[in-house]
């Protein structure tokens, strides 16, 4: 669980420093879940959506559905000039 939060925060650090300074860390985004339990996929996706909406260097791609028909998402972090959807 903590590993997922650390990975999410490291991804946020790869974003532009000015933008990353404005982003909420995963620990602040999920204040109750940090030390208590595992995060659900929907909670992780909500943070990925938050990062993509608040950064010009991140975009969300939905690449399919799980066997339970839940969306599968991918966060792409890149310069806006090198990657466009």
Image (cartoon, rainbow, N blue to C red):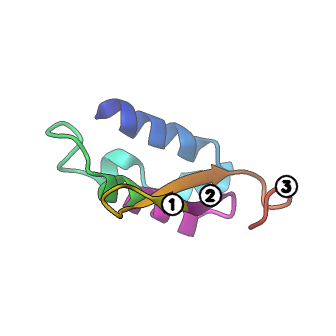
Q: Distance from label 3 to label 1 (Cα)? A: 24 Å
- Whether residue 5 is visible to the viewer of this picture, yes or no, is yes
* Numbered label attached to residue 82: 3
Seen at 30% across and 59% down, the residue is 68
Q: Secondary structure at mark 3?
A: loop
Q: Secondary structure at mark 1?
A: strand
Of badges 3 and 1, nearer the viewer stands: 1
Seen at 55% across and 53% down, the residue is 74
- Whether residue 29 is visible to the viewer of this picture, yes or no, is no
**In front of the other: 47 or 60:** 60
Asked if residue 55 lies in the magenta stretch, the reply is yes
Which residue is disc 2 drawn over? 19
**In front of the other: 58 or 19:** 58
Which residue is disc 1 drawn over? 64
Of badges 3 and 2, nearer the viewer stands: 3
65, above or below 76, in the image: below
Query: Could you tell which of marks 3 and 1 lies nearer the N-terminus?
Result: 1
> Residue 32, position in %: x, y?
17, 50
Q: Distance from label 1 to label 2 (Cα)? A: 29 Å
Position of the C terminus by quadrant = bottom right
Q: Quadrant of residue 83?
A: bottom right
> Residue 71, position in %: x, y?
42, 63
Start-end of magenta stretch: 46-62
């Amino acid at each position: 669980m903590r590993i997922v939060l650390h990975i999410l925060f490291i991804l946020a650090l790869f974003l532009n420093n000015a933008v990353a300074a404005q982003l909420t860390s995963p620990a602040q985004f999920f204040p109750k879940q940090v030390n208590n339990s595992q995060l659900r996929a929907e909670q992780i996706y909500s943070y990925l959506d938050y990062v993509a909406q608040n950064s010009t260097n991140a975009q969300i791609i939905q690449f399919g559905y799980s066997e339970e028909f839940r969306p599968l998402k991918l966060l792409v972090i890149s310069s806006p000039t090198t990657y466009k959807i």
